[in-house]
Amino acid sequence: MSEPVVVFKNVGKSYPQYNHITGGLKNFIFHLPTALKTLRTARYESLRDLSFEVQSGECLGVIGRNGAGKSTTLGLIAGVLKQTLGDVIVKKRVFPLLELGAGFNHDLTGRENIYLNGILMGMTKAEVACKETEIIEFSELGEFINQPIRVYSSGMLARLGFSVVACLEPELLLIDEILAVGDMEFQKKCLDKMLAFKQKGVTMIFVSHSMEDVKRICDRALWIENHMLKQIGPVQDVVQAYAQSFHS
Amino acid sequence: MLAMRGRKQYGNRRYNLKPRLRYMLDLISILTHKDLKVRYKSSMLGYLWSIANPLAFAFVFYIAFKVIMKIQMEGYALFLIAGLFPWQWFANSVTVTPTVFLANASIIKKVNFSRNILPFTIVLQDMLHFILSIPVIVLFMFIYHKTPGWIWLVGIPVLLIIQFIMAYGIALAISSINLFFRDLERLTALGVTLLFYFTPIFYPETMIPVKYQQLINFNPLTPLIISWRNLFLHNQLDGMYLAISLGYGLVFLGIGFWIYRKLAWKFAEVL
C-alpha cells in the first residue's frame, strides 16, 4: 500500500497559443515576427506547481470547477500530454476512461471497438478475445454490439467504454466524468465495479462533479482551483471545504 | 529549475521483445482493419477501387497520348499500367496522410500509444492494395505476350521495401506538420499532382530532352518508378536506380522520424 504509483513533482503545464499557426501557413508566414513572438510569450497556463502522490491501491478523487485543470492532470498521467515543468512519474500501465467514446471509432461496430480500444490500451488481441464475452455481457448492449457505434446513444457509449475498461483488469484507472450519462441502474453497476476494483487494490483516479460519488469511492481528494493545488487530504474534509467555497 | 525533464514511465514494465512485437502486430492489424472499414465500408469493394482508379487513369492517358497524340511506342497500355500502379500507391498514401492524425483525434487525445503507427498502417494498406493489383499487370503482360521472370522474386520485395520506407518517411513528416499547419493538406494535394507530371509515368524517361536529362534524378520518384517499370516490362533491375531510390527512401525516413520526434508530444495539445 505504501509505494507511490503516480508522483507529480512541482508540475507545471502551459500551452502556447496555437491558434495563429493552425490558422494557416499563409497567416504564419505573413506575420512571421509577431507569430514567432506570440508563440514564445503568449502561453496559457493550465497547471502551476502541482505536487502530489497517489499510493498503490488508493483511490484519489479530483475535484474543482470547470477549467481548473482537472483534465489536464489526467492527460499528464495518461501520457498524452507532456509537462512543461517538473516531473511526472507513472509506474503502472494506465487505463484511461476519459470522456465518452474516447478511443472509439464511430464506423466500427461495438464488438470491433472493444478490440480497438483494448489493443490501444496495451492489451494483445488474444487478451481481449479472452474477455470479449464478459465485456459484452457487462455492457448489456445485446443486439447493438454488432451495430456501428454511431447509432449508439451517449448512455450506450458510456456503457461500452466502461465495460471494456472494467473487464480488462486495469492496474491504474483514470475516470473522467464518465458516469454522468448512464442510467441509474448502470451507474450503480459501475460504482459497484469500482468498489470491487478498490477491494482488489486497483489504483484509481476519479474526476467528478458528483460529490456523492467521490465520497463513496475515494479515500482522498485533490481539489484544484485556478490551476493550482488548493487542498489535498481525506475525502470528507476536502469535499466539505469545496462545498463551502460555493456558499461563502 | 526542473526544466523539461524526461517523463519516467512504466517503471516496472518488463517487456521483452517477443510480446512487444506481438502487440505491435495486433495494433497494426486492428488499425488497418479499422481504416479499411472506414475508407471503403467493406474491404472487397476497396480492392476493386484500388484497381479501378489507376485503370481509369491508364484509359484516359491511353486515349490522350496514344489515340490522339499518337505517341510512338509499342505496348503503351502496359507501359502506362506498370508505372501508374506503383504511383497510385504512393499518391494515395501521401494524399490521405495529412489528415491521419486529425481523423484519429479521439484516440490520440486519450490513449498513449505510438502514434507513428497510424501513418504506418495507411502506407501498409496502400501497399497491400498495390500487391493485390499486381495480377492485373500480369494480365496485361500476357496480352502483350510477355511473361514475368524469376527476378521478380527479388525485385518486387526490394522495391516494395524501398517505396514503403520512402512513402512512410514522407507520410510521417507531412502528417506531423499538418497538425500545426492545417493547410499543408492542400499543398500536399497540389504537390502530388505536380510530382505526377514531373515523373516519367505516362512518358518514358528517354523522351526527356537531353539538357534536362541530368535533372531527372532530382525527383525522388523517378528512379523508383523507372525501376518498377523496368522490372515489369523487361524483367530488369538496375543497380544504380535501386541505390538512388534507396538513398532517397532512407533520407525521407530519417527526416520523417526526426520531425515526428520533435512534434509528437504536442499532438494532443493541438488536436
Image: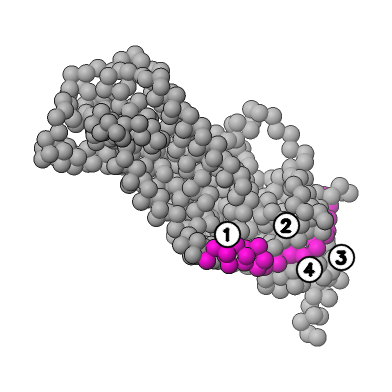
Q: Is residue A201 above or below residue A229?
A: above
Residue lying at the far top of the rendered structure: B150
Colour approach in the figure = one colour
Q: How many marks?
A: 4
| Numbered disc in front, either 4 or 2 | 2
Q: Which amino acid lies under the numbered mark 4 shown in the image of this protein?
A: Met
- Within-10-Å neighbours for mark 4: few <14, some 14–19, many 20+: some
* Mark closer to the chain start, 4 or 2: 2
Report the residue at 83% width, 76% height from top: A241
The three-letter code of the residue at mark 2 reads Thr
Q: What's the CA distance linking mark 4 and mark 2?
A: 15 Å
Q: CA distance from mark 2 to mark 3?
A: 26 Å
Viewer-nearest residue: B219 or B102: B219
Q: Amino acid at mark 1?
A: Val
Part of the protein shown in magenta:
A31-59
Q: Residue at label 3?
A: A233
Circle 2 residue = A84
Query: Do tags 2 and 3 sit on the same chain?
Result: yes
Q: Which amino acid type corresponds to the residue marked 3 in the rendered image?
A: Gly
For residue A228, the mark is 4
Q: Nearer the viewer, residue A16 or B146?
A: A16
| Label 2 CA crowd tier, 10 Å (few <14, some 14–19, many 20+) | some
Query: Which chain letter goes with mark 3?
Result: A
